[in-house]
Image (tube, rainbow, N blue to C red):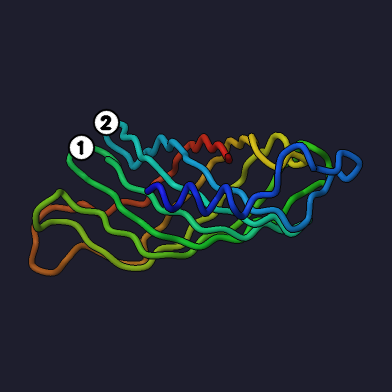
């Protein structure tokens, strides 16, 4: 875990050297934690911890996510995904739209559930695009599994779900 933080610090230029005249910072790498509050139907809400990495190309942002947590009782969730987001403005604070694709595992911790590819769509708002560190975002994300329950298992522990995500980039 320490090597990931060290890599993020080494790849990010010093915060004091940033150019305040350019509101659209092309070529910046960001890394940080996230908290997601998913809803997959049913009476119980879950929580998911995430690790985010992004690279801002100016109008586009390319990234990768890893997340793990509880979708709803008793369904656990783990996923790795890549994503591409498009900024809707070039201001210091901006809305963005994007799509995700990756691998998802939803299970009860034993034998029920399923695993496979998933697609996602997200809309969010990012604060501090002109900063080299200390950015924050809030987004709404929909994740759709492209797989079903494992064969010959009773019940259903595979859900399409929406989540409210809080992201902080170091």
Q: Distance between the residues labelled 2 and 1?
A: 6 Å
For label 1, the crowd category at 10 Å Cα-Cα, with few meaning under 14, some 14 to 19 and many 20 or more, is few
* Position of the C terminus by quadrant: top right
| Quarter assignment of residue 59 | bottom right
Give the x, y percent position of residue 8: 55, 50
Q: Nearer the viewer, residue 113 or 47?
A: 47
- Residue at 78 percent of width and 56 percent of height: 26
Of residue 125 and residue 23, the one placed in the foreground of this image is 23
| Residue appearing at x 20%, y 62% in the figure | 149
Query: Percent position (x, y) of residue 123?
Result: 61, 46
Between residue 104 and residue 121, name the one nearer to us.
104
Task: Tell me the tag on residue 27.
Answer: none
> Which residue position is annotated with label 1?
73
Q: At 77% across and 49% down in the image, what residue appears?
A: 88
Asked if the residues shown at circle 2 and circle 1 are in contact, with their CB atoms under 8 angstroms apart, the answer is yes
Q: Give how far across and how far down residue 164 sits, in percent.
A: 48, 36
Badge 2 density bin: few <14, some 14–19, many ≥20, Cα 10 Å: few
Q: Which label was assigned to residue 44?
A: 2
- Residue 12, compared with residue 48, is above or below; it is below
How many discs appear?
2
Give percent across and percent down for residue 15.
72, 39
From the viewer's perspective, is 108 left or right of 31?
A: left
Which image quarter: residue 57? bottom right
Q: Is residue 44 above or below residue 13?
A: above
In the rendered structure, the answer to whether residue 161 lies left or right of residue 157 reads right
Q: Could you tell me which secondary element the residue under label 2 belongs to? A: loop
**Element assignment for label 1:** loop
Residue at 26 percent of width and 30 percent of height: 43
Dot placed on the residue nearer the N-terminal end, 2 or 1: 2
């Amino acid at each position: 875990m320490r090597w990931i933080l060290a890599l993020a610090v080494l790849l990010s230029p010093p915060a004091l050297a940033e150019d305040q005249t350019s509101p659209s910072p092309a070529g910046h790498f960001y890394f940080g934690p996230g908290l997601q509050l998913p809803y997959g139907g049913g009476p119980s809400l879950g929580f998911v911890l995430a690790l985010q990495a992004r690279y801002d190309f100016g109008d586009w942002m390319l990234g990768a996510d890893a997340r793990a947590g509880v979708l709803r009782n008793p369904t656990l969730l783990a996923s790795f995904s890549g994503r591409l987001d498009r900024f809707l403005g070039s201001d210091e604070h901006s809305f963005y739209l994007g799509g995700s694709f990756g691998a998802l595992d939803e299970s009860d911790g034993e034998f029920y559930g399923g695993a496979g590819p998933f697609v996602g769509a997200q809309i969010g708002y990012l604060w501090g695009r002109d900063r080299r560190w200390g950015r924050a975002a809030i987004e709404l994300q929909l994740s759709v599994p492209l797989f079903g329950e494992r064969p010959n298992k009773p019940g259903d522990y595979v859900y399409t779900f929406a989540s409210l995500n809080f992201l902080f980039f170091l």
